[in-house]
Amino acid sequence: MAKVKGAIVVDIEKCKGCSVCVPACPKTVVQLAREVNGKGYHYAYMEHPDDCIGCANCAIVCPDGVITVYKVKL
């Protein structure tokens, strides 16, 4: 079976920092940034990008749909 590498892209300016995606990640990849976006929210980002498995849990639970998940077979 092929190994899958994942990556997420967050629309930083639309993220409101609700942090619902943080506990949804089984590999603790997603965290909230210390920096803020244009609206003053701490946005989600990939803290540990090498650990992402592309499960899409973060995108599924995101109430605003600002997370896109990409998967690559290795």
Image (tube, rainbow, N blue to C red):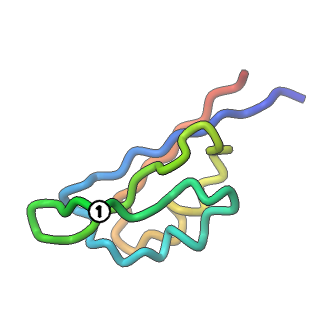
* Number of marks present in the image shown: 1
Residue 25: quadrant of the picture: bottom right
Q: In the visual, does 31 lie left or right of 43? A: right
Q: Quadrant of the C terminus?
A: top right
- Looking at this view, is 20 or 66 the one in front? 20
**Where is residue 68 shown, x and y percent of the image?**
44, 48
Q: Look at 90% across and 29% down and name the residue there.
A: 1
**Where is residue 72 shown, x and y percent of the image?**
63, 28
Label 1 packing within 10 angstroms: few (<14), some (14-19), many (20+): few
Reply above or below: 2 against 51. Answer: above
Residue 17: quadrant of the picture: bottom left
Reply above or below: 4 against 59. Answer: above
Reply above or below: 60 against 6. Answer: below
- Looking at this view, is 36 or 73 the one in front? 36
Kindly identify the amino acid type of the residue bearing the numbered disc 1: Arg
Q: Look at 33% across and 60% down and name the residue there.
A: 33
Spot the residue most to the left: 38
Disc 1 designates what residue?
A: 34
- Looking at this view, is 12 or 66 the one in front? 12
Q: Look at 46% across and 49% down and name the residue there.
A: 46
Q: In the visual, does 14 lie left or right of 58? A: left
Spot the residue most to the top: 74
**Where is residue 9 shown, x and y percent of the image?**
39, 45
Element marked by disc 1:
strand
Q: Look at 68% across and 44% down and name the residue there.
A: 53
Q: In the visual, does 64 lie left or right of 37? A: right
Spot the residue most to the right: 1
